Image (cartoon, coloured by chain):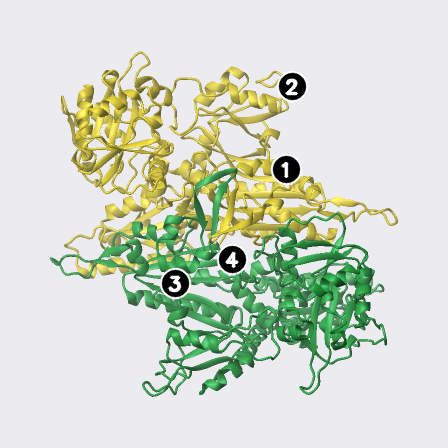
Chain colours: A yellow, B green
Amino acid sequence: MASGVESELKGLSIEPLKLSHGVCKNMVEWHEQLNGIDFKPDFEYKLVKTMVFKPKAPKSETAPLIALIALEDSQTSSATVCKAVNVKEARLANEDAVKSALSVSTADVSPFSITSENSSALKVVLDKSLLDYHGKLGVHPNDSTHTIFISQKDLQDYLLKTNVEVIEVDFTSDVYASGSAGAAKPEAKKTAATQKPSAEIEGAALIGITVHKEIDFSGWYQQVLTKGDMLDYYDVSGCYILKPWSYTIWEQIQNLFGCYLEWFDARIKEIGVENCYFPMFVSSKVLEREKDHIEGFAPEVAWVTKAGSADLDEPIAIRPTSETVMYPYYAKWIRSHRDLPLRLNQWNSVVRWEFKHPQPFLRTREFLWQEGHTAHLTFEDANSEVLQILDFYAGVYEQLLAVPVIKGKKTDKERFAGGLFTTTCEGYIPATGRGIQGATSHCLGQNFSKMFGITVEDPFAKEGEGKEKLFVWQNSWGLSTRVIGVMVMIHGDNKGLVLPPRVAGHQVVIVPCGITTKTSHANKDSLYKDITKFAAQLTEAGIRVKADLRDSYSPGYKFNDWELKGVPLRLEYGPQDAKKGQVLSARRDSGEKSPISLNNLVPSVNKLLETIQNDLYQKAKHSFDSNIQKIDKWDDFVPALNQKKLVLMPFCLEEACEDDIKERSKRTDSGEAEDAKAPSMGAKSLCRPFDQPTGLIPGRTKCLACEKDAKEFTLFGRSY
Amino acid sequence: MASGVESELKGLSIEPLKLSHGVCKNMVEWHEQLNGIDFKPDFEYKLVKTMVFKPKAPKSETAPLIALIALEDSQTSSATVCKAVNVKEARLANEDAVKSALSVSTADVSPFSITSENSSALKVVLDKSLLDYHGKLGVHPNDSTHTIFISQKDLQDYLLKTNVEVIEVDFTSDVYASGSAGAAKPEAKKTAATQKPSAEIEGAALIGITVHKEIDFSGWYQQVLTKGDMLDYYDVSGCYILKPWSYTIWEQIQNLFGCYLEWFDARIKEIGVENCYFPMFVSSKVLEREKDHIEGFAPEVAWVTKAGSADLDEPIAIRPTSETVMYPYYAKWIRSHRDLPLRLNQWNSVVRWEFKHPQPFLRTREFLWQEGHTAHLTFEDANSEVLQILDFYAGVYEQLLAVPVIKGKKTDKERFAGGLFTTTCEGYIPATGRGIQGATSHCLGQNFSKMFGITVEDPFAKEGEGKEKLFVWQNSWGLSTRVIGVMVMIHGDNKGLVLPPRVAGHQVVIVPCGITTKTSHANKDSLYKDITKFAAQLTEAGIRVKADLRDSYSPGYKFNDWELKGVPLRLEYGPQDAKKGQVLSARRDSGEKSPISLNNLVPSVNKLLETIQNDLYQKAKHSFDSNIQKIDKWDDFVPALNQKKLVLMPFCLEEACEDDIKERSKRTDSGEAEDAKAPSMGAKSLCRPFDQPTGLIPGRTKCLACEKDAKEFTLFGRSY
C-alpha cells in the first residue's frame, strides 16, 4: 500500500478490515480473488469500481481527467459520465495517462488514488447508489492485491479532504428506460453547480448494453455476451458456460440437429473423414514424445495427480491437443499403404491452462473444437487436403458467420510446433484494429511419423527391389468455438448481438403489437392464432422462428430483448396489420422496417434473411478491406497500426527480422489505447496471403524492415 | 512367491530377472503393471498366458484339468484345446477348481503351478509358437505381483521334471483359414501320442474371433470389440479409444450427421430441452456442496493439482456428473416462475476414476454421455418429464439397438445419491445371466434446490397474501455409451459383431464375387460399374451402403471382415448374378441367403433391413422373457440365479432385507463360473417394474425373503 494512503486511512472512523490476495485486473478477477481466499464476511458489502476517463480535447488543451467511482453493479454508461461533466466524448485513459496523473497503474486505481496533490487535475463522477448503500464498500488501497472495507461516509469524508470536484450522478433513473419511449433522464447533482445529462446510450436499459463498443470495447464484449445470453462467467477462472444461445451456433457450424445448411461435419465426411473419440487423458511418457511439439504446450498442461483421496502413481495430463495421444495408435493401425489415407476427426474439448488474461471464446482454459488428424501416402495428398480443409474453415467464417478472412501460410516463426507448415485464415476486429487467427490447418510433414514410427512399405517399389519403408505424411487441423467470439466482436453493436441468419438460434421472432387493455379477448386470441399460424408456415419452410407470446412483457421489452440477443429479423403483428394483411418486418442489422404481405410471407422472409446475411458480410468485408494498408516504406508501418490497420508489405520471411519488427512496433506513442486490456504490443506476422498483390520483383524488391530481398507480401498486425 | 517355486527355479540355467508390481488379473492388467513400473528391458520378451480348463464330464468322473500355456499373442481357441486333448467340451475352470488342483488362485496361475505333486491330475497344452520363440518368456511365479523372465528351454526343462503330459499344438496353422473353404487343420503333436484336432471355432481366422462367447465371455467380448473395430485399448488404464465404427453408433443414437431416424437429441429438443456446455472443471467448494450426493462420487473424483510446472492454489475436480456444477447457475438464472421450466442438456464426457476392474463401454474411467438437468415449478411437471425421458431411453434400446429393457423404479437402496426417486430401464445379458442398468432418469425432488437456493415466488399465491418462496422441482437424466456395450454383448456371436440396421455404420455391404484370373477386364469393369450404381441407388434411398471394391482381398476375406464388423446385410454380385438380374443377399444375424431381383432392389433391401431389426429384437426379447423367473418361495431364488436367470418376486422394499438378500445369494455353489471375471456376487434389486404381475395382495402376500408384508414385485439379479 502506498504510504500516502496508509496515513490517509488513519483518519478514517475505524481501522478498516484489510485482505491480501492475488493481482486482479478487473472486477471479475477481483471476485475470483476474494472467492479464492474463501472470504466470507459477517457484513454485507459491494465492491467499488474506479475508472478513469480522458475527455477528447484539442492537443493544446489539457482537460481534467474524470474518475468514475461507482458500485460494482451500477449500470454506468460512459455517455452519462460525459454528460455529467459536460464533455462531448471521453475514452478510458490509457496506462500512461493514468500513471502520470494519479501515480498508480490502471489496475491499482482506487478512490484513494485521488489526493490533495492531484485533485485539481481531476473531476469525480460519484454514483448516487453508492451514497445510498448501507453495507461496506470494498476498495483497493491503490494496490490490486489488497481489499479494504470502508463505509460510504468514510469515502465521502476522504474525497472532501482532497478538495476534488465531485459530481453525483443517479445512474438508476435511466436503467429501465426504453430508447423508443420517452425515457426518464438520469439526474446529476453537481456539488457546486447542477448539470443535467441529456442523453444516454441509445436504447440502454437494465437488460441492455450500457457501454459503447467504441469506448470500452472489452466492457462492451463482456456485456454483449452475458446480456445477449451467450455465456455466463464460471467460478473456475478462465472457464465459461456456453449457454444454449451460443451452443446452438456451434451446432449449426458442426452441422448438428436440424441445421440450416449441411456444414462442417457433413463436408469432412463427404471427403472421407470419420469421427471417433480418444480419451482426454495422456500419460506423460506419450505426451512428451515429440520434443518441439511438447515444448509449445508444456507450460499450459493441466495434470491430474489424485483420484479420490489416493495419489496416482504418475501424473496424467489432460490433452492440450491430440497429436501425441493419437499417433502411437496410427503406428499400430497403419500396416500397409492400403490403410491410407487414415482420416479421423474428433469433436471434443481440450485444456490449455493459460496464465494470460482469459477472454471468453478467444482464450479460455477449456474450449470446444474439432481436431482432424490424417495420414497420407504422399506429400501431394496431404498438401491437397490441408488446403481443402482451409477452404472449409474459410467457408465457416464467410458463408456461415458472415466474417471475411484472408487465407495464407504462416511464417516459420508462427507455424505449429513440430509441423512442416501451417495454413491459416486470418480475421480482423475493427473495434480494436487487431488481427485474429481464425483457424489453422497444418501439414505436419513426416516429423511425427518418424517420431512415432508410422510407416508403410513403398507400394511403388519395383518387384525384386528391397521394399523401402515410407514414413507417412500427416496433417492436423482444428476449428474452435473462438469463431463465435470473432463473429460477436465484428457484428455486434451498442444494442447487443447481431447474429447472421445462417447460424442464429432463432432467425425470426414474431411479436404481437398494439394490444391494449381495450383490446377484446377475442381479438387478442385471433391475433395470437394468426401468429402461431405464421410461425408454423415459416417452420414448415425450414426457417427457425420464435413466436413471442409471453403475456407478461410489453412489446418494447420484447423488442429490446431480441435485439440484445441479435435475432436477425423481427416481425410485428397487430390489429392494424391484420386489417392490412401484412406483418411489419424490422431488420436487426440495419434497423430498416418494411411491411410484408401475408400472401407472400415465406418467400419474403427467406429473401430478407439472405439479404441480411449478405449485407453483414459485405459490410464486414468493406471494413476489412479498407483497413489493410499496403505500404511501401517502413515509416508507414507503425502509424498504420496506430490507425488500427493491418499492414501488407514485402517481407524477407526471416525470423530475426520478424522479431525485430515486433520490437520496433511496440506502442510507444502516448495516444489513446483502443482497448484498455490490450497490452502495448508489437506487431506479429499474421500470414503470407495466398492472394499476393502484384509488384514484388524477386531480387529487386526489398523487405521494408531490413532491406534484404523480399520474398513475399506478408500481412502484419497487432493481434489476439 | 510360493516356496516350492523358489526351489524349482534354483534349477534353471541362470538366475532369472524378477520384477515386483501390483496385482494383475488378466493380460491387459499385466501389461499395465509392467508399464506402470516403467519396465524397459534390453531384451525382447513376450508374456505367457496360462489358462486352466475343466472338461465337461459326468459328475461321477474326474477328468484331468487342462492347462493351456501359450504366448500372449497366440490366437488360441478353446475348441482347438479341446480337440488336442480329445474332449468334447471344456470350460474355464472356476476359482475353487483351480485352487484345489493347483493350490493357487486363478490370477496367480503359471506354468510353475504345475508340480510333480499335481502333474498326474493335469494335461498341458503347449503353444508351439512358444517353443519357437527366441526371446524371453515373462511368467508369474505363482504370484501375479511378480514377473520373472525365463527362456523356452527353461520352461521345457521345468515341465519335463514335473512329469506332466504335454501336448504341443500349432495354433498358427489354422489362423488364416476361412470356415467356409477347406481350412488347414491345426497340427497337434502329443509328446506321448499325437492327436489331431478336427475342428476349430467355425469361421475362425486371424482376423476372426478365436474364443467361444459361451466359454470365455470376457475374452470373447474383448476380441469382438477390438477385431470388430469398435475400440482399441489405451495406455491409460480404464480408458479406451472409440473408433469410428462404434462412434458412428453413438452418432446415430444422438441423431447427428445424416442419421437414419430422428433420435434422442431431436426428441428432447421437440419437448423443449436445449443443449449447452458447462466446463469440465469444478471447484472443490462447489463439488462438495451437497453432502449425500458427493459421498456417492468422492472416491472416484479425479483432481487436477498442477498446471505446467506450477501447483494450483487449490485442487480442481473433473466433473463426475454436473449437478453441483450447474445448479449454482440455475439459482442465478431462475428469477421467476416465468423462467421455468429450465431444461438443459449436455453431450459431454465425465470422469469417474473407478478402481474396480474396468470393462470397455460398461465401466470406463472417462465416458461419453448426455446429461439432462431440468427445473420445474411443480412436482407433477417434473414427474411427467422423468417418465417421458425414460420412454426415450427405452426407445433407444428397443427401437434403435433392438435390446429389450424393463422399465421401473429403483428401490431406495439403489436410487441416485441426493435424489427423490430414480427410474431405470434394465437390460439382461444372457451369456452371463446378469442384469445391467441401461439408463436412469432421476427425479431429484427439491433436495438440490434447497441446497442451492433455487427458488421462485409462488405464482398461485393470492393477491395480498405474502408471496411464498417455492423451491423448484428438479430432474436429472443420463444415457451413456454403455448402451453400445450392452448391444454388443446381446447380439454378437462367434463370428463377431451383429449390428442392428438402425445404428450400423454400414447397413449394407456389396461384394463383387466370382471374379477369377480368367475374367476379362471388361467384364470385371462392368460388374464394378453395376455395383457402384446399386450403391448409388441405395444411398439415394437413405440406406448406408458400402461397395467393397478392394482389389487386394478375396471375397472370402471380405465376407469374414464384414461379418466380424457386424454389417447387417451383405449383397454378393458376380457374373452369374448379372445374368440373372439379381444380387444374392446374406443376412448377418441368421446367415439366411436369398436372391433379390435388381428390379426391386431398394424396397427389398429396405424390407430386409426392417426384418433383421425386428428379428434381432424378437430374439433378444424371447431370451429376456424366458430368463425372468417369477418365484413364489425363497428356496427358488439362488437356484434361479445359478441358472443365469433374473428373479421376480414379492418384496417388502426394505433396505435391510435387500442387504440380507445380497448376502444370502452370494455364489457358494461349486458350479462353473459363467464368467471368469464375475465376482461371486450376491443379487441386487434391479427395479420395481412399472408393469407389475398380478397376484400380489396387499396385507396378505409376504416378502419371500423376510416374511414381512410384500409391497411390490421386484426384479432381482446378479448384475453389472
Q: Secondary structure at mark 4?
A: strand
The amino acid at mark 4 is Phe
Residue at the spot x=57%, y=23% of the render?
A658
Q: Locate residue A616, reporting x and y percent.
A: 42, 39
Q: Work out whether disc 1 and disc 2 sit on a shared chain.
A: yes
Residue nearer the viewer, B631 or A457: B631
Q: Amino acid at mark 1?
A: Lys
Asked if the residue under mark 2 is in contact with the one under mark 1, i.e. CB atoms within 8 Å, the reply is no
Chain to which mark 4 belongs: B
Residue on which the image places disc 4: B367
Seen as rendered, the residue at the extreme left is: B464
The numbered dot on residue A257 is: none
Q: Provide the secondary structure element on which disc 3 rests.
A: loop
Q: Which chain does the numbered disc 2 sit on?
A: A
The dot on residue B417 is 3
Is residue B144 left or right of A544 when viewed as pictured?
A: right
Q: Secondary structure at mark 2?
A: loop
Q: What x and y, as percent, mark residue B586?
A: 67, 73
Of the 4 image quadrants, the one containing the N terminus of chain B is bottom right
Name the disc covering residue A709, or none: 2
Q: CA distance from mark 4 to mark 1?
A: 30 Å
Type of amino acid under label 2: Asp
How far apart are the two marked residues, 1 and 2, measured between alpha carbons?
A: 33 Å
Circle 3/circle 1 CB separation < 8 Å:
no
Q: Which tag is nearer the camera, tag 1 or tag 2? A: 1
Q: Mark 2 and mark 3 in contact (Cβ < 8 Å)?
A: no
